[in-house]
Image (tube, grey):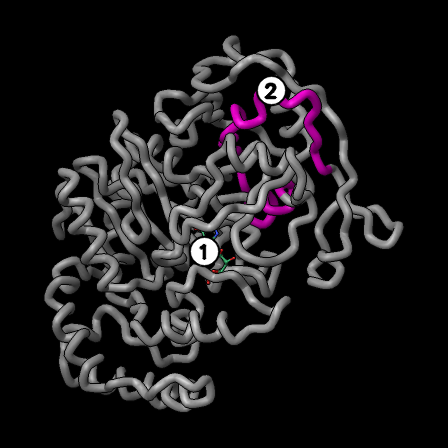
């Protein structure tokens, strides 16, 4: 398989960073195709921890091309800071190793301000619990045809025209929310100042990737967030503002859908969610607390405690369909070590009716109660297992039952944050 897409199959934080890093060794190009610096990817390489938000995980591996596609929204100030940080850790980032699509919309400081002001003004039940990084407002400006894009940084006159167009929309909006008008001159000056630090990386990514593809190079598409945060197929309105599902990989960089050969869904052995919104299998008891503590479930971007619950096979079966997942990478199985009994949600009960999928209406989602199947746990440790033989029988039974319920095979099993602690069943890049 030449090109592989990696997507989160739950609400994000499934452990994509490690798997992307693991796969990036076999890839030539690593491309981000949606989201922004709301993502948090933690990579552990030889005990050294790298924290990435906007940069593709491939940057930490030498000799690879990392790409930020047009489907991403980019905060240029954050990017420059992230590049500086990662450079300090000994990683070299140059225009030869990092390319940013010229048609990538920028996240401006006004987007973050608007994001946070709206969240603060929201009443209980309407708050989304965003990362506050301006992702939603930046995507709004993109589809509203008033975004400032990377290419606009190259010409002062164009840049000023773009800023003015955006401010025509933002100033009245800010007035309504009680935020002071934008300092137009300061914003233009800030953009002109950052431009020379971004422009060297700007490139026609669609063209470069097409050339790479034709030359037989392997492209790894790195998803951020998770399919249940997808703007169309997620738990709307408690979602992020981009398409997260695998189909977005094509539009998010400018290649045809036929160039995607394999979709790898990353699936955590239980369920977590940050932010507001429905979560049928959420546990607010000692078991939930134990999952959170054992799994170190704190958001990498905001530090918020993640909500935890049992594995929801209904949801993952659904996201495997909407993303066309060929195989999953099952992560954090070791967090379940020591539970006497494990529960898996196999269906929902909605007002006495059994459903095998999560309905789309938010009100119905909130009323769905999980129907559980119980499986025996295991007392042995699975942490660091590198072969099936290292796993207790009940852990294997759990994995096999998950495969059956979600109707998708396990391609990789990850048993610790270290990249070597991975059991390979099917290599997504194998021809
Ligand atoms: P936004 O993307 O900042 O607008 O946040 C919208 C929703 O997506 C909130 O519930 C966030 O907690 C969630 N979210 C955004 N990025 C991530 C991520 O990388 N992991 C998990 N949740 C995320």
Tell me the magenta residue range.
Answer: 316-345
Is residue 278 depicted above or below 189 in this figure? above
Q: Are circles 2 and 1 on residues that touch, CB within 8 Å? A: no
> In the image, residue 331 lies at what x, y percent?
50, 31
The single residue placed furthest to the top in the displayed view is 389
Image quarter (top left, top right, bottom left or bottom right) of the C terminus: top left
Count neighbours of disc 1 (C-alpha within 10 A) and say few if under 14, some if 14 to 19, many if 20 or more.
many
Is residue 216 depicted above or below 113 in this figure? above
Instruction: Examine the structure image and report whether residue 324 is included in the region drawn in magenta.
Output: yes
> Left of 195 or right of it: where is 254?
right
For marks 2 and 1, the one nearer the N-term is: 1
The single residue placed furthest to the front in the displayed view is 286
**Secondary structure of residue under mark 1:** helix
Quickly name the residue at label 1.
Answer: 248
Which mark identifies residue 17? none
> Left of 6 or right of it: where is 59?
left
């Amino acid at each position: 398989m030449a090109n592989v897409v990696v997507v989160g199959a739950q609400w994000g934080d499934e452990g994509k960073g490690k798997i992307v890093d693991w796969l990036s060794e076999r890839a030539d190009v690593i491309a981000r195709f949606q989201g922004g610096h709301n993502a948090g990817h933690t990579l552990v390489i030889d005990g050294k921890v790298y924290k990435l938000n906007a940069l593709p995980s491939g940057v930490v591996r030498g000799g690879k091309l990392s790409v930020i596609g047009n489907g991403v929204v980019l905060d240029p100030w954050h990017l420059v800071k992230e590049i500086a940080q990662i450079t300090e850790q000994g990683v070299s980032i140059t225009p030869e190793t990092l390319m940013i699509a010229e048609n990538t919309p920028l996240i401006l400081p006004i987007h973050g301000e608007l994001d946070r002001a709206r969240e603060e003004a929201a009443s209980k039940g309407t708050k989304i619990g965003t990362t506050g990084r301006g992702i939603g407002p930046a995507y709004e400006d993109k589809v509203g045809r008033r975004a400032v894009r990377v290419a606009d940084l190259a010409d002062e006159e164009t840049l000023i025209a773009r800023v003015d167009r955006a401010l025509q929309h933002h100033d009245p909006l800010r007035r309504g929310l009680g935020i002071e008008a934008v300092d137009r001159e300061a914003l233009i000056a800030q953009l002109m100042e950052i431009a020379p630090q971004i422009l060297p990386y700007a490139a026609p990514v669609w063209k470069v990737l097409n050339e790479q593809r034709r030359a037989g190079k392997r492209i790894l598409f790195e998803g951020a967030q998770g399919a249940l945060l997808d703007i169309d197929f997620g738990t709307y309105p408690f979602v992020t503002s981009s398409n997260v599902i695998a189909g977005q990989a094509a539009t998010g960089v400018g290649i045809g859908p036929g160039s995607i050969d394999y979709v790898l869904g990353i699936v955590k052995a239980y369920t977590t969610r940050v932010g507001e919104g429905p979560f049928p299998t959420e546990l607010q008891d000692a078991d939930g607390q134990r999952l959170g503590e054992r799994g170190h479930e704190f958001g990498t971007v905001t530090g918020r405690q993640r909500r935890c619950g049992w594995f929801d096979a209904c949801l993952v079966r659904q996201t495997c369909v909407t993303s066309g997942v060929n195989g999953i990478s099952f992560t954090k199985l070791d967090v379940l070590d020591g539970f006497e009994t494990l529960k898996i949600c196999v269906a929902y009960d909605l007002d006495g009716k059994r459903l095998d999928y999560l309905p789309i209406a938010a009100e119905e989602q909130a009323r769905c109660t999980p129907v559980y199947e119980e499986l025996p746990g295991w007392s042995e440790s699975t942490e660091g297992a590198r072969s099936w033989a290292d796993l207790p029988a009940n852990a294997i039974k759990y994995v096999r039952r998950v495969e059956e319920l979600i109707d998708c095979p396990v391609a990789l099993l990850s048993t610790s944050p270290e990249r070597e602690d991975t059991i390979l069943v099917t290599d997504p890049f194998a021809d």
